[in-house]
Image (cartoon, rainbow, N blue to C red):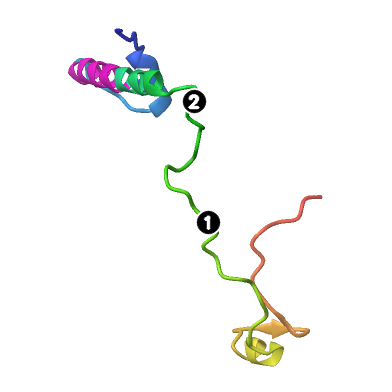
Amino acid sequence: MPVEIDIDHVAKLARVELTDDEKARMRDQLAVILEHAAKVGEVAADDVVPTASPIPQVNVFREDGPEPSLSHDAAIANAPAAADERFLVPKIAETGS
């Protein structure tokens, strides 16, 4: 089934300028892509459960648990600047008033 494509509108959305030759080539290529996508939709059967992945997946993350880490003093000791036992960083945003 042929697909009608407004390639000027697509180019405007993509913010690209196309020559007439490019428009013709892109229109043909996009039509082929959309026709193939439509065929995939035809293959889908009602008895197939929709899935995000064809391979069953399980949680691959490790169990979360406390582990040794830097002490507060050791972390602050590496800071370029600190004040009141906190990292001192330059202001990057203005507060609204």
Tell me the quarter of the picture where residue 39 sits.
Answer: top left
Tell me the quarter of the picture where residue 32 sits.
Answer: top left
Q: Nearer the viewer, residue 47 or 57?
A: 47
Q: Vertically, is 49 above or below 59? A: above
Q: Nearer the viewer, residue 43 or 8?
A: 43
Q: Residue 32 in magenta? A: yes
In the image as oriented, which residue stretches furthest toward the right?
97
User: Is disc 2 surrounded by few (<14), some (14 to 19) or many (20+) residues within 10 Å?
Assistant: few
Marks 1 and 2: which is nearer the front? 2
- Percent x, y for residue 61? 55, 65
Q: Vertically, is 10 above or below 65? A: above
Q: Vertically, is 77 above or below 11? A: below
Indicate which disc, 1 or 2, sits on the residue closer to the N terminus.
Answer: 2
Mark 1 to mark 2 CA distance (whole Å): 24 Å
> Which residue matches tag 2?
47
The reply to whether callout 1 and callout 2 are in contact (CB within 8 Å) is no
Residue at image point 78% right, 84% down: 84
User: Is disc 1 surrounded by few (<14), some (14 to 19) or many (20+) residues within 10 Å?
Assistant: few
> Which residue matches tag 1?
58
Residue at image point 42% right, 42% down: 54
Q: Vertically, is 33 above or below 80? A: above
Q: Give the SS element for disc 2.
A: loop
Q: Residue 71 in magenta? A: no
Q: Give the SS element for disc 1.
A: loop
Q: Nearer the viewer, residue 10 or 97?
A: 10
Q: Main secondary structure of the magenta part?
A: helix
* Image: magenta residue range: 21-33
